[in-house]
Image (tube, coloured by chain):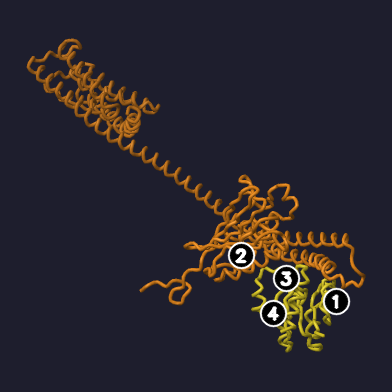
Chain colours: A yellow, B orange
């Protein structure tokens, strides 16, 4: 069973996505609320995909991505954020594997995760 | 002229009179003494003449002391003019050289009184002379020979008239010069006064300029402060908008997310099937949440556009893949409605210089509007190449828009009021933003519509300039 690491500083959002991924996607999910915890957990558990919120208190998504890569975590990382004015391509050019808009459309997130694990 | 002449006369008379009077007084006293000592005669008239001279000197001196210069001058002048003529009485006409001294009286009048006074004194002196010559026996003087009388009379008349005329002319010239000098001096005084006034004005103006400079400096400082404050306010507003948008979207994301989970994945909850009535209500929660999210996004876009902070990431974008994507989305929006989706663009199409995210936003807005208002018929997405631009359009056979409302649809928060429209949720900002975005690209947007028959929303985008010598910009020819 594929493992997914979810990083989001809002508890309710985290619990919602976690449940959808677990019950609908049938993934093993662990979630943390900060970039620091994400790095620690990713190093220990080696998840298949990381879903990373961009706008977070403390370490933001982009910095977390760079730290993850610096710590040798090479799995796909999905930028998951509220509608951004930046183009999806911009996230990809910054090193993210994909970008999913945080608009409540959980099916889109599931589809993207499925594609990344299937690769 | 008269007034200005009076002043030098008086000052001149004041200067000249005292020494003149002293000389006259001295000579009168001397002649009186000589008469007493050496030339004693039986006649009293020489003594009377000397006495009259002394008396006139005394009178003149008294008048001078009282400041009556004119009268003093007249008195001396007449004494000098008439007393030598009166010397005919004691000494006769023949060999009497004293009479020629009367010319001094005429000169004195011209100098001490006025140029005209010389003539008056000469006239009076000639009158007295004539009386003495014509009536020789009047005061008991000796009767001379007629030829002598005639020759002395003629010489005296000529002398007096000549002296009077010359004195008058000289006096006139002197008075003219003095007048001119006085006028010049008063003119220069006036000029100096004017200069002082001008200088005063200038100094006042300089002071005022300094004050204005001070005020300007203060205003500049105030302006600088105001600008800093405005910039701070603007920065805090921009950061407030960014924070608010995140804070608003986070809970909305959860509302929509859980609604979607309940509807799409009820198996998550292990509680058996959810009743249709509940599902319908949850759908309504999701729909309202999505509407609110759209509204927030639109308002943020509009705020950004109006603040001039919406930046376009322009690049050469191939149109066909973009339009194909829009077609797929439209197909998803229509689902199983009896609406035919038409493709009205050729392949290939030239690339356009655009921000793909923003043009996608415009096209999605137009097709979602078309889907909202079209229940039967067709919807078309089209493009046509013109010389410098590409025209894109979204056509539908929906409810259409009346002529009177055609411009209003592009206004903020304007939704055309129809019975049908009330069933369709919308922010009323979408088309306004679309037009802004198209104009930011240098294009324009317009609407052709007929009420009840359908609408065509069209807009233009600039074409990518043809590439010359492998460079994006045409290079000049050398």
Question: Numbered disc 2: what chain?
Answer: B
Residue beneath the point at 86% across and 62% down = B279
Dot in front, 1 or 4: 1
What subunit carries mark 4? A
Examine the image and state in which quarter residue B127 appears: top left
Q: Residues within 10 Å of mark 3 (few under 14, many from 20)?
A: some
Task: Give residue A101's mark.
Answer: 3
Q: Is residue B182 toward the left or the right of residue B412 in the image?
A: left
Q: Position of residue B143 (x, y in %)?
A: 12, 13
Quarter of the C terminus of chain B within the rendering = bottom left
Residue on which the image places disc 1: A23
Q: Check the residue under mark 3 and report the chain it is in.
A: A
| Crowd around label 2: few <14 · some 14–19 · many ≥20 (10 Å) | some
Residue at (66% x, 53% y) in the render: B398
Q: Which mark is residue B359?
A: 2
Label 4 to label 3: alpha-carbon separation: 13 Å
Secondary structure beneath dot 1 equals: helix
């Amino acid at each position: 069973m594929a493992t997914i690491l979810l990083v989001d500083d809002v508890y309710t959002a985290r619990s919602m996505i976690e449940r959808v991924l677990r019950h609908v996607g049938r993934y093993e999910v662990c979630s943390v609320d900060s970039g620091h915890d994400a790095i620690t957990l990713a190093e220990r558990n080696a998840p298949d995909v990381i879903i990373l919120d961009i706008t977070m208190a403390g370490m933001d998504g982009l910095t977390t991505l760079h730290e993850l890569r610096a710590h040798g975590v090479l799995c796909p990382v999905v930028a998951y954020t509220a509608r951004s004015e930046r183009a999806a391509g911009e996230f990809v050019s910054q090193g993210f594997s994909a970008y999913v808009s945080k608009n409540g459309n959980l099916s889109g997130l599931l589809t993207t995760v499925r594609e990344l694990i299937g690769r | 002229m008269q007034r200005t002449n009076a002043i030098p006369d008086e000052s001149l008379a004041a200067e000249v009179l005292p020494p003149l009077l002293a000389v006259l007084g001295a000579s009168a006293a001397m002649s009186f003494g000589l008469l007493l000592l050496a030339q004693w005669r039986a006649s009293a008239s020489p003594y009377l003449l000397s006495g009259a001279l002394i008396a006139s000197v005394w009178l003149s001196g008294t008048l001078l002391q009282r400041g009556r210069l004119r009268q003093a001058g007249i008195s001396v002048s007449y004494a000098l003019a008439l007393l030598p003529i009166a010397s005919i009485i004691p000494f006769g006409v023949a060999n009497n050289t004293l009479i020629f001294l009367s010319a001094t009286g005429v000169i004195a009048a011209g100098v001490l009184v006025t140029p005209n006074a010389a003539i008056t004194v000469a006239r009076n002196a000639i009158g007295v002379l004539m009386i003495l010559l014509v009536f020789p026996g009047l005061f008991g003087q000796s009767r001379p020979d007629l030829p002598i009388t005639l020759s002395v009379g003629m010489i005296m008349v000529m002398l007096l008239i000549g002296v009077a005329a010359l004195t008058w002319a000289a006096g006139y010239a002197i008075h003219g010069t003095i007048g001119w000098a006085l006028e010049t001096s008063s003119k220069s005084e006036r000029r100096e006064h004017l200069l002082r006034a001008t200088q005063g004005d200038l100094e006042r103006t300089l002071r005022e300029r300094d004050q204005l400079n001070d005020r300007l400096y203060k205003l500049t400082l105030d302006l600088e402060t105001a600008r800093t404050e405005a910039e701070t306010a603007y920065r805090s507003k921009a950061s407030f908008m960014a924070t608010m948008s995140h804070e608003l979207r986070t809970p909305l994301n959860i509302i929509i997310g859980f609604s979607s989970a309940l509807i799409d994945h009820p198996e998550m909850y292990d509680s058996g099937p959810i009743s249709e009535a509940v599902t319908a209500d949850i759908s309504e929660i999701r729909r309202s949440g999505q509407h609110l999210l759209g509204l927030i996004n639109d308002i943020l876009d509009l705020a950004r556009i109006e603040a001039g902070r919406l930046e376009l990431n322009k690049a050469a974008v191939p149109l066909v893949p973009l339009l194909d994507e829009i077609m797929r989305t439209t197909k998803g929006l229509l689902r199983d409605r009896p609406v035919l989706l038409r493709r009205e663009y050729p392949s290939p199409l030239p690339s356009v210089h655009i921000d793909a995210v923003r043009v996608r936003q415009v096209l999605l807005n137009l097709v979602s509007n078309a889907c909202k208002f079209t229940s039967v018929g067709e919807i078309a997405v089209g493009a046509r190449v013109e010389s410098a631009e590409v025209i894109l359009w979204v056509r539908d056979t929906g409810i259409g828009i009346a002529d009177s409302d055609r411009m209003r649809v592009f206004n903020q928060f304007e939704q055309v009021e129809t019975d049908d429209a009330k069933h369709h949720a919308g922010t009323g900002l979408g088309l306004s933003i679309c037009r802004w975005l198209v104009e930011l690209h240098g294009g324009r947007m317009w609407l052709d519509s007929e009420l009840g028959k359908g609408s065509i929303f069209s807009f233009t985008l600039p074409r990518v300039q043809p590439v010359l010598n492998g460079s994006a910009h045409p290079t000049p020819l050398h």
